[in-house]
Amino acid sequence: MNVMYDNFLRVVKVLYIIIYARLSKEEKDKQSEEEQSKSIQHQFEICREYIEEEQKEYPNCKFIIIEELYDDGISGTTFDRADFNKLVKLVENKQNNKSINKNLYSNETVNYMVITKDLSRLGRDHVETDNYIEKWFPEHNVRYVSILESVDTYDTDNVSNDIAPIINWSNDQFAKTTSKKIRKEFKNKMKLGKWMGGEPPLGYQQNPKDKYHFIIEPVGAEIVKRIFKLALEEKTPEEISNILIADKVPIPSIIKGKKRNLNTDLKDLWSADTIRDILRNKMYLGHMVQGKTTKLNYKSKKIIYLPEEDWIVVENMHEPIIKESDFKSVQLLIKSNKNTTTNTHDYLLKGMIKCKECHHAIGIQHFNKRNNNYTVCSYYRKYGSKKEVCTAHRFHYEELEKLVIKSIKKECMQFVDSTNFADKLKDKEQSKQLLIDLKLNIDKSNRKIFKIEKQIDTIYEDKLNDVIDDEQYKRMVKNKQDDIIFEKKKLEQYQKDLEAIAAKKIIEPNYNKIVKDFLAMKKPNKIIIGKLIDKIELSEDGTIDIHYKVQNPYKKI
C-alpha cells in the first residue's frame, strides 16, 4: 500500500486541498460569460478527477478539498491576484486555521496541497513561477501539483519537476508574444481613429452601435461648453472650478454614473486640474487623441507618459463640441496665464514679456496701495542677490502697456484698408512654418522607413541563423511591411500639402478681421493681443521690441 511523504519525510495522513484556476484577460475578452464559466468549471473538474485517482492510490491518506479559488480575467504575468493572494494567506496561516485544526490531534501535522490544471494557470512569469515551485511551496511544506505537466513537488525524483522551469519560460515567452501582438493591434486600431480607452472624456459617450466611436452626451457637452466660455472670459481654472462648485454642477464621475466611494460633501467639488485637462483636450475639436502613455514592459505596471509628438491623433473622427477658433483662443490664454493663480493680479501683457538680455520671462510686481506697478526680470529676481545674473529691468508696467497698445494700433492702421497685413502673414509666417513642419515630418517618416527596413534585414538574418522559424519570419515581416505602407501614405499626403502651398491653395484665417476687431475695441483683451503678438522683448535700456506674428518688424518705440 502506497504511503505519501511530505518534504520533511513525514507520513502524510491528511491533505487539505486548494484547487486554483485562472482565466486570462485575453481568454475572457474572446469568450462569452457562459464559455468563461465553463472554462473555470472545466479546470475544477480536471483537478477533482485527479484527486479521486490520488485517493485510490493513497487510501490511508484523506484528501479534503477546502477551497476552490479562481481569478477571472487576470494576466498570468502578475501574481497580484485576489484569489491567489487568498491562497498564499491560507498556506501561511495554516497552523492557526481553526476550521482545519479542530478535528486534529495536537501532534498532528497540517499538510496543504495546491493543484492546478497546468503550469500556466499558476502563472506566466517564469521567474516568479519557478520561485513558487522550487522554493516557496517546498519551504511551506505544500504539495503543488500541475496535472498536465505531471509536476509534483512531493515527488523529488520526478523528472517533470526538472523540466518545469523550461515550461515556465515557454509560458512566459507566450505571454510576451501575446502582449506584443495585442499592443500592436491596439495601436493599429488607434491609427484608424478607433477608441481603445476606457471612459470617454466628459461630453462624449461610446456609440451603442459602434463602441469604437463617440457621440455627444448632452449634459456633459453643455458643461464643457460652459467651461470654455468662462475661459474665454479670462477666468482662470481656479475661478472656473469655484463657479461650478457654487452652482452645484456635478463632477464628471457623477455625470457619467461611475460608482465611486465619494463623500457626499465632495461630490460637487471641481478640481482646477480637471478644468485644465478639459481646456487642453483636443478631443473636443472632434479629433481622436490616444497613445499618451505606455508601460515599461509587459510585466510592469509602471506608466510612462509619452511626449505629445508621439501621441496618436486622428482628426475629424466625431462631432466637435468646441469650435477650433475658440479652442485656439483658450490655448493663448492658458499660455499667458501659465503661472497665474487666484492670488495674483492679472495683466494684459502677462506671459508675453521676455528679457532681451537673458531671454527669461519678465514678471510684474504688484503693489495694492500704489498706482504704478513694475516689471522685473524673473531670472534676476530669483538669483540676482546670490550671483551676478542679468539686471532688474525695472520699468513702470502701466507705461509699458500704453506704449505697446499704441504701437500695435499704429501697425494695424497701416494695413487695415489693404490685404498687405494678411498677405505678409501668409507669405512670411504661415507658409514658412507649414513648409518647415512638412519638411520635418517628411524627414521623420523617411528615417522611420529606413529604420523599419533595417529591422526587416535583422529579422531575415535571424531566420537564416535559425533563431526564428519560417512562420515567425513571415508574421514579423508582414507587420513591418504594414508599418512601411502606413508611413508611405503619410509621405504622399505631405507631398500633396507641399504642392498646395506652392500653388497658394492654403486656406488662411481672416487676419484682416483680427486687425479690425483690435482697432474696434475700447480696451483690447488677451485673446486679440495673443493672435497678433508672439512676444515682447524688453531691454535694460528701456528699448521695446514687439515680435508680431505678422511680419516681426523689430521696431523701437
Image (cartoon, rainbow, N blue to C red):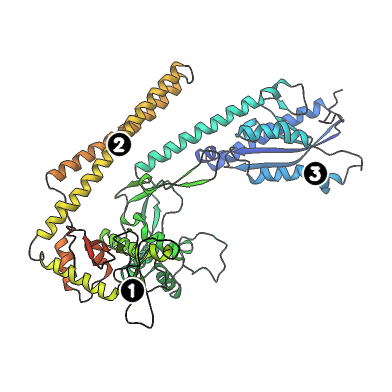
Residue 10, percent from left and from top:
87, 31
Quadrant where the C terminus sits is: bottom left
Label 1 sits on residue:
374
> Marks 1/3: CA distance?
74 Å
Instruction: Name which of mark 3 and mark 2 comes first in the sequence.
Output: 3
Q: Which amino acid does label 2 sit on?
A: Ser
> Marks 1/2: CA distance?
48 Å
Q: What residue type is labelled 3?
A: Lys
Note whether 459 is above or below 368 in the view shown. above
Helix, strand or loop at mark 2: helix
Judging depth in this view, the residue of 260 and 533 nearest the camera is: 533
Residue 43, percent from left and from top:
65, 34
**Image quadrant where residue 534 sits:** bottom left
Label 3 sits on residue:
94
Helix, strand or loop at mark 3: helix
**Is residue 517 at least partly visible in the picture?**
no
Q: What residue type is labelled 1?
A: Tyr
Instruction: Name which of mark 1 and mark 2 comes first in the sequence.
Output: 1
Instruction: Name which of mark 1 and mark 3 comes first in the sequence.
Output: 3
Using a 10 Å C-alpha cutoff, classify the residue at mark 3 as few (fewer than 14 neighbours), some (14 to 19) or many (20 or more).
some
Residue 187, percent from left and from top:
40, 40
**Image quadrant where residue 374 sits:** bottom left
Describe residue 367's horizontal placement relative to residue 269 as left or right. Answer: left
Residue at the image point whose x is 32% and y is 58% from the top: 359
Residue 504, percent from left and from top:
12, 47
Helix, strand or loop at mark 1: strand
Label 2 sits on residue:
445
> Marks 3/2: CA distance?
61 Å
In this view, the residue farthest toward the left is: 418
Using a 10 Å C-alpha cutoff, classify the residue at mark 1 as few (fewer than 14 neighbours), some (14 to 19) or many (20 or more).
some
Judging depth in this view, the residue of 60 and 8 nearest the camera is: 8
